[in-house]
Amino acid sequence: MPTPPAVLCIAGLDPSAGAGIVADAKTCAALGVYAATAVTALTVQSTRGVFLVQPVEAEFLGRELDALLDDFSFAAIKIGMLCEPAAVARVAVALRRVPELPVVLDPVAAASSGARFWSAGLREALFAELFPLCALLTPNLPEAAVLLGRTAEEIEADPAGACGALRLLGPRAVLLKGGHRRERDAVDLLDEAGELVELRAERIETRNSHGTGCTLSSAIAAELACGAPLVEAVRRAKRFVEEGLRGARDWQLGSGSGPLAHFRPRVN
């Protein structure tokens, strides 16, 4: 059995295993990629929501990252929940050690239940420290609105303009996720160096959608680690998420928003 490519996943811990770093690891495993993990925050949460967030100290996070980067040869990096500017700065220090690696940043600003994760100054720290180091930024409509200081309605009315404005902040490409848009299909918009690609998928009606954004971003990182070009990596990752939503449509795990079915046959 050949050695799989490795992805460094940097995110928070969801004990219910639907989102965060556990979802990242499950996604990578399902796609044949090895995930090493650096935890940014501990949370108290279930399928019913997020009840408490305890960020990991920036020094501890830095020690996690240094230990892993000293040991592994990674092929891509995925970043999820970051809560404090000091953590952002420490992640940026680590990324500068491996400037050749593609970095996928999912700017997790809040849980779908409404719990907010960002402390004061976090947005500005992302702009200054992380965005210029990222190959791809993957916000949904509410996250794009927070980042740009606009309303979600304004983002929905001009998604191409929002992508362009976000790309001007530093990332080489932006994937504006369309799960919150009021359309029949789930329509994402990818802006890669000004080239726009619209990506449509069937909107799966299910209560089991916890961790969709984490799964998508880690699937993109896994596909990039396997050598896929960005557009193809996004297409494959979207198909993986669609299959995960469809596969878990009738699951009864927990009493709230349950997880995706990560371990299903891959669709190429």
Image (cartoon, helix red, strand yellow):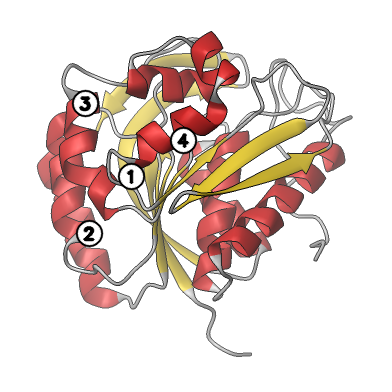
Decide which of tag 2 and tag 1 comes sooner along the chain. 1
Q: Secondary structure at mark 1?
A: strand
Q: CA distance from mark 1 to mark 3?
A: 18 Å
Q: Amino acid at mark 1?
A: Val
Circles 3, 2 touching at the beta carbon (< 8 Å): no
Decide which of tag 2 and tag 4 comes sooner along the chain. 2
Mark 3 burial class by Cα count in 10 Å: few <14, some 14-19, many 20+: some
Location of mark 1 (residue): 39
Mark 2 burial class by Cα count in 10 Å: few <14, some 14-19, many 20+: many
Q: Quadrant of the N terminus?
A: bottom right
Decide which of tag 3 and tag 2 comes sooner along the chain. 2
Circles 4, 3 touching at the beta carbon (< 8 Å): no
Circles 2, 1 touching at the beta carbon (< 8 Å): no
Decide which of tag 1 and tag 3 comes sooner along the chain. 1
Q: Is 130 displayed left or right of 195 in the figure?
A: left
Q: CA distance from mark 2 to mark 4?
A: 23 Å
Q: CA distance from mark 4 to mark 3?
A: 20 Å
Location of mark 3 (residue): 122
Circles 1, 4 touching at the beta carbon (< 8 Å): no
Question: Which residue is rendered at x = 75% and y = 54% of the image?
Answer: 263
Q: Residue furthest bottom?
A: 1
Q: CA distance from mark 1 to mark 4?
A: 29 Å
Q: Amino acid at mark 4?
A: Cys
Q: Secondary structure at mark 3?
A: helix
Callout in the foreground (2, 1) = 2
Question: Which residue is rendered at x = 83% and y = 23% of the image?
Answer: 184
Location of mark 4 (residue): 163
Which of the 4 quarters of the picture holds residue 49?
top right
Q: Is residue 212 above or below residue 181?
A: below
Q: Amino acid at mark 2?
A: Leu
Location of mark 2 (residue): 95
Callout in the foreground (2, 4) = 4
